[in-house]
Amino acid sequence: MKKTSILLCVVLTFVFFAGIPEVLAVMKEAAPASALNPGASVQPGPPDLAVTVKIVHVESWTKDDGTKCYSPRPYFTITNKGQSAANNFDYIIEWKLGPGHTWQVYTSSNPTISLKPGETKTIDGNQPSWEQPWCGDPDWKPGWRISADTKKTVAESNETNNVAEKFFEPSIMIKRETPKAIKKEIQPAPVQNRTPMRIR
């Protein structure tokens, strides 16, 4: 009985110490690099450029021939949502023109900018110099588009959010501005209560 107990203790001790390296290996795989090497610096993630465009004002007027004209004015943003700086990338702003219904570059040149993580660049088009009128052409919708990093200078974590566009529908504006016809209900004349005449 004593020999059996000693043998059992030896076996259990062997199994215990044999399992320690495996446990340590699993812990090493699960631990982050910074925990295993406290002196090592954590590398930030790549940049991520995201753009938006919205219409903030619509200028409208009527031509001498009665045609209604509209000029939607845009507002753009370019934001670096990543963890690293995005350096020396370009952006292009375009306007949808008729009657060819094609995009035409509005910016005279391709500006080059840099953005720190979390930084935003805004382009405010709510001013007369951005006038691009639409006048009565029912076959197309005017619109604005912005594209960032068109030359693929920046290696980003997400390359699918670099283009944004916004269209304006003049037909909706025309319906809103058309005054509704005012219907006047004809009221019947009030009936006068007269006292019957007495015949003498």
Image (spheres, helix red, strand yellow):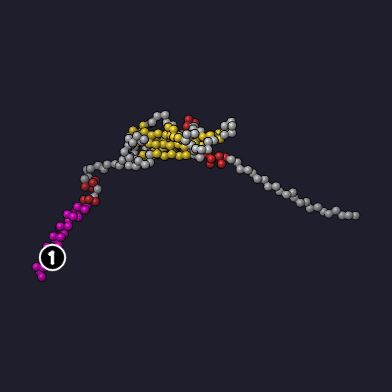
Horizontal relation, residue 36 to residue 86: left or right: left
Residue 58: image location, x then y, percent: 51, 36
Horizontal relation, residue 87 to residue 40: left or right: right
Q: Residue at x 45, y 35 (%)?
A: 102
**Which residue is farthest bottom?**
1
Q: Identify which residue, 129 or 115, lies in the foreground.
A: 129
Q: Name the element at disc 1.
A: helix
Horizontal relation, residue 128 to residue 152: left or right: right
**Residue 61 found in image quarter:** top right
Q: Identify which residue, 167 or 114, lies in the foreground.
A: 167
Residue 23: image location, x then y, percent: 20, 55
Q: Identify which residue, 30 or 133, lies in the foreground.
A: 133
Q: Is residue 83 visible?
A: no
Say which quadrant the C terminus sits in.
bottom right
**Residue 103 found in image quarter:** top left
Please, what is the three-letter code of the amino acid marked with disc 1? Leu
Say which quadrant the N terminus sits in.
bottom left
Residue 57: image location, x then y, percent: 50, 37
Q: Residue at x 24, y 48 (%)?
A: 32
**Which residue is farthest left?**
3
Residue 161: image location, x then y, percent: 38, 41
**Which residue is farthest right?**
200
Up-down relation of residue 44 to residue 112 (above or below):
below
Q: Identify which residue, 111 or 199, lies in the foreground.
A: 111
> Which SS does the magenta portion mostly show?
helix
Q: Indicate whether residue 2 is drawn in magenta.
A: yes
Magenta part of the protein: which range?
A: 1-27
The residue pinned by badge 1 equals: 8
**Which residue is farthest top?**
108
Up-down relation of residue 15 to residue 135 (above or below):
below
